Image (tube, grey):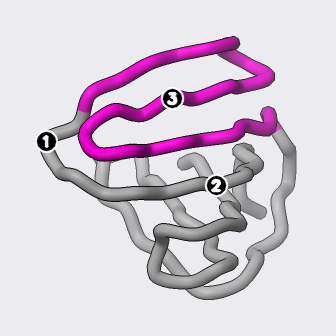
């Protein structure tokens, strides 16, 4: 399992926690859920179908998505308690 805490605009809530299960399903809750271990931090900018991610783990990435939206997020990734 992996966990992401994101703060910013474009998601359902200004502050949210997303938990990604090993089978690929995802769930999100409002607010911050504590980590057992923090893996990294990232900045995500999503404009239209293009997503730019600057991550402490993976460096800079550019991706394309099917859905058009706008998001500007600061996030922390890691493992839940």
Let me know if residue 48 is in the magenta part: yes
Quadrant in the rendering for residue 56: top right
The Cα–Cα distance between marks 2 and 3, rounded to whole angstroms, is: 11 Å
Tag 1, which secondary structure? strand
* Secondary structure under the numbered disc 2 in the rendered image: strand
Q: What element carries label 3?
A: strand
> Dominant secondary structure of the magenta stretch?
strand
Cβ atoms at labels 2 and 3 below 8 Å apart: no
Is residue 42 found left or right of 21 in the rendered image?
A: right
Label 1 to label 3: alpha-carbon separation:
15 Å
Mark found first going from the N terminus, 1 or 3: 3
> Quarter of the image containing the C terminus?
bottom right
Label 2, label 1: how far apart the Cα atoms are: 19 Å
* Stretch of the chain drawn in magenta: 39-64
Nearer to the camera, 21 or 67: 67
For marks 2 and 1 on the same chain, the one whose residue lies earlier in the sequence: 1
Few, some or many residues within 10 Å of mark 3 (<14, 14–19, 20+): some
- Residue 45 lies left or right of residue 50; in this view the side is right
Picture disc at residue 73: 2
Q: Which residue: 62% across, 14% down?
A: 60
Image quarter for residue 9? Answer: bottom right
Relative placement, left or right, of 78 versus 47 is right
Residue displayed at 25% across by 39% down: 49
- Residue with the mark numbered 1: 66
The circle drawn on residue 54 is none
**Marked residue nearer the N-terminal end (2 or 3):** 3
Name the residue beneath numbered marker 3: 52
The residue under the point 85% across, 43% down is: 38
- The x, y position of residue 55, in whole percent, is 71, 25
Coordinates of residue 80 in the picture (x, y in percent): 71, 59
Where 79 sits versus 17, above or below?
above
Say if 43 sits above or below 72 in the image.
above
């Amino acid at each position: 399992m992996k966990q992401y805490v994101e703060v910013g605009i474009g998601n359902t809530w200004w502050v949210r926690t997303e938990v990604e299960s090993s089978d690929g399903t995802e769930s999100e809750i409002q607010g911050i859920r504590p980590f057992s271990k923090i893996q990294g931090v990232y900045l995500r900018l999503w404009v239209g179908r293009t997503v730019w991610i600057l991550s402490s783990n993976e460096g800079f990435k550019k991706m394309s998505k099917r859905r058009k939206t706008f998001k500007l997020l600061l996030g922390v990734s890691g493992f839940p308690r």
